[in-house]
Amino acid sequence: MEKTPATKPPVALQAVKGMNDVLPAESAKWEYFEQTATRVARQYGYRNMRAPIVEHTPLFVRSIGEVTDIVEKEMYSFEDKLNGEKLTLRPELTAGLVRASIESNLVYNGPVRVYCLGQMFRHERPQKGRYRQFSQFDVECFGFEGPDVDAEIMIMTARLWRELGIPDVRLEINTLGGVKERIVYRNELIRHYEANLEALDDEAKRRLHTNPMRILDSKVASVIEVNKTAPNLLDSLERDSRAHFDGLQQLLTDAGVPFVVNPRIVRGMDYYNRTAFEFVTERFGAPLTVCGGGRYDGLFEQLGGKPTPAIGFGMGIERVLMMLPDEQKSSGLDAYIVHAGVGAQKTASTLSESLRNAGLAVAQHAGGGSFKSQMKKADASGARFALIIGDNEVSAGTVAVKPLRDANGSPIQGEQAIITSSAVAAHLRS
Ligand code: ATP
Ligand code: MG
């Protein structure tokens, strides 16, 4: 077929801004990540859980908090045209998974560890590593007080980085204390910022009395300066919170997982308490958070459930994929079947199915064409072997087997061999 230049449909028929397609050439990376993350989570006893993409808007407002970036300006909210219900596309997973757990009394028989993969939606300004539809690998532990399970999810994530071959992510931890300590700390913070009012930007001023801890997270230069002398919550921790935080650090040290304490980590949602953490990379210039999470012991009650201590994290998959090498992973195809002639078509179909029965991945050429053009397709398919069937092979009950790529997917020039049909599966395996 002639190659036609890419045409651009009218805007209304193009993808929504900040929402990306994943084409076949990129999907190997996605699947590699999803499979690795799933395998590691299962190795630690986590089970898959899923919740709907759409939830009632108040669920997110209540859990994430009114004065947060997400609720103030990032949520895709709309009214159900049929019944007027206020709905929102999920901007994160914790709220939905907690809601589902409360509704099904999931923690009735004891604590539960779960993981989930899926798409989130936030109306942000699209740029590299920041999209309006993005994906997260999310892990939640319901019913555990920690700090053992706090350490566990960080140790598990450290393993995931090793398995993925990503060495340059740094674990930063902090504690947000308990409700009482936060009230005291909040007032200290407000006093500090009031004394430095001229350095605050409009957003920080607006948050001064509603959510001052969020100002610690500001990216504005003058605010960063004021934050350097801000009081430290670590200094006013009560005994239990201190013991929790010390316990976490000891467990991480025992496990050989390096970390730094960063008192500026406050996280974007109101529901967090005690342990907060992020995995950060410097690979792209400015520090980029690839994974963030923390403890949220009050959220179950806040959403109408029984008191249930909990911790979890969300990992931005697009940001992780930016850190994976671009090398073309093999297509996963064992063989591409090239065939010419009516008899060959039938033989090719029978052979394809029998190889698939043997567990092999086989693409059978479709759409006719010359032997030469079919061989080009075989090359482009990334398959390890081309299996060639012509009239001669049909009458002899054989197949010509031509190696195309090695186990790593690199092209090779191999000798063609003539194999009896029934021995092809074993030959491809050897
Ligand atoms: P940021 O400070 O970068 O806006 P955040 O605090 O809003 O991050 P979280 O709500 O903690 O992020 O989400 C967890 C992870 O999800 C982030 O660390 C990041 O990897 C990813 N993430 C968040 N927002 C986006 C987005 N718009 N596009 C791509 N990934 C995102
Ligand atoms: Mg954000």
Image: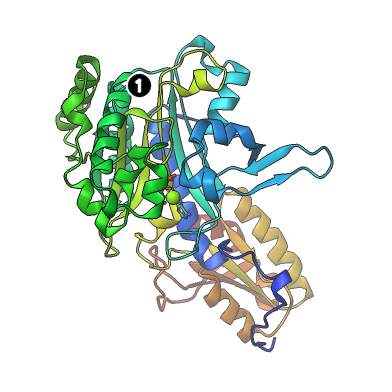
Say if residue 6 shows up in the picture: yes
Image coords of residue 177 (percent x, y): 28, 25
Image coords of residue 248 (percent x, y): 22, 26
Image coords of residue 397 (percent x, y): 65, 66
Q: Give the residue drawn at x 50%, y 17%.
A: 301
- Tell me the quarter of the picture where residue 235 sits: top left
Q: Is residue 178 left or right of residue 427?
A: left
Q: Give the residue drawn at x 29%, y 44%.
A: 216
Say if residue 167 shows up in the picture: no
Vertical position of residue 294 compared to residue 7: above or below:
above
In this rendered view, identify the residue nearer to me: 375 or 425. Answer: 375
The structure's colour scheme is: rainbow
Q: Quadrant of the C terminus?
A: bottom left
Q: Quadrant of the N terminus?
A: bottom right
Vertical position of residue 177 compared to residue 392: above or below:
above
Q: Is residue 324 left or right of residue 74?
A: left
Q: Give the residue drawn at x 81%, y 45%.
A: 81
Residue furthest top in the image: 109
In this rendered view, identify the residue nearer to me: 416 or 304. Answer: 304
Residue furthest right in the image: 82
Q: Give the residue drawn at x 35%, y 39%.
A: 212
- Tell me the quarter of the picture where residue 374 sits: bottom right
Count residues near mark 1 (Cα–Cα under 10 Å), then give few for <14, some for 14-19, many for 20+.
few
Q: Is residue 288 left or right of residue 23?
A: left
Image coords of residue 196 (percent x, y): 24, 47
In this rendered view, identify the residue nearer to me: 372 or 392. Answer: 372
Residue that badge 1 annotates: 179
Q: Is mark 1 within 8 Å of ligand 1?
A: no
Residue type at numbered disc 1:
Val
Q: Is residue 286 left or right of residue 33?
A: left
* Circle 1: element type: helix
